[in-house]
Amino acid sequence: MTLQSRRSKRQFARGGLSRQKAPRIQSALAGAGENLDLDWLESAPRDEAMDFLTGLPGVGRKTAACVQVFTWDRPEIPVDVHVYRIGGRLGLFRPNANFDEAHDELLRLVDPGDSYEFHMNLIRHGRELCRPRPDCNACGLNRMCPFGRAVISGEPVRERPSRPDR
Ligand code: SF4
């Protein structure tokens, strides 16, 4: 076992994720049936692959989008709490959009060839600057960000809390 995988395993266990995720993985495998060869999904039409994946127990749209983009390099933008938070602050979708609507809107806005990079950059931005308490003064996007402009000018800001996603 490598140092990285030992560390990941510890983080996974410490976050309580192992208890939550293990049964989900087991039920997803059971839901996939006896034929676990999922290679056909790579060349299946996008909607067909999404329908199959989201039909598995415990698999939501974010997870299905992660499988599509990270396994097969297909244009997808998984909407996790970082992507949802930043997209909402930048006004890329309407304020009360749910995660599915945000997903549809981002796919519509972003060139398919840029979707992987867009997703990865938003995750990174959400971890480094656009955290729940954002550092808007240090952010290169602040001139085009309605939320950031309000924060910098001291206006009261309200945000819809992000729902847990899967
Ligand atoms: S200006 Fe602030 S709220 Fe807007 S993207 Fe940057 S850090 Fe996030």
Image (cartoon, rainbow, N blue to C red):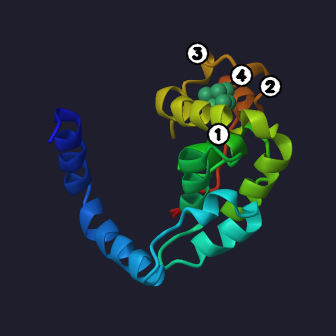
Which residue type carries mark 3? Ala
Give the residue drawn at x 60%, y 48%: 72
Which circle's residue, 1 or 2, is located before the other in the chain? 1
Q: Label 4, label 1: how many angstroms apart (C-alpha)? A: 12 Å
- Looking at the picture, does residue 85 appear above or below residue 99? above
Specify the amino acid type for callout 1: Ile
Whether residue 130 can be seen here: no
**Which residue is the site of mark 1?**
86
Nearer to the camera, 20 or 29: 29
Label 4 beta carbon less than 8 Å to ligand 1? yes
Q: Are marks 1 and 3 in contact (CB under 8 Å)?
A: no
Report whether the residue tagged 1 is closer than 8 Å to ligand 1: yes
Q: Which residue is mark 2?
A: 144
Q: Residues within 10 Å of mark 3 (few under 14, many from 20)?
A: few
Pinpoint residue 43: horizontal percent, then vertical percent.
Answer: 69, 58
Q: Is residue 79 left or right of residue 101?
A: left
Identity, as a three-letter code, of the amino acid under mark 2? Met
Determine the residue located farthest toward the right in the rendered image: 108
Q: Which residue is mark 3?
A: 138
Considering only order in the chain, which callout, 3 or 2, is on the residue closer to the N terminus?
Answer: 3
Secondary structure under the numbered disc 4 in the rendered image: helix
Q: Does any atom of ligand 1 lie closer than 8 Å to the CB of label 3?
A: yes
Q: Secondary structure at mark 1?
A: helix
62 vs 124: above or below? below
Where in the figure is residue 4, as x and y percent of width and height? Answer: 23, 35
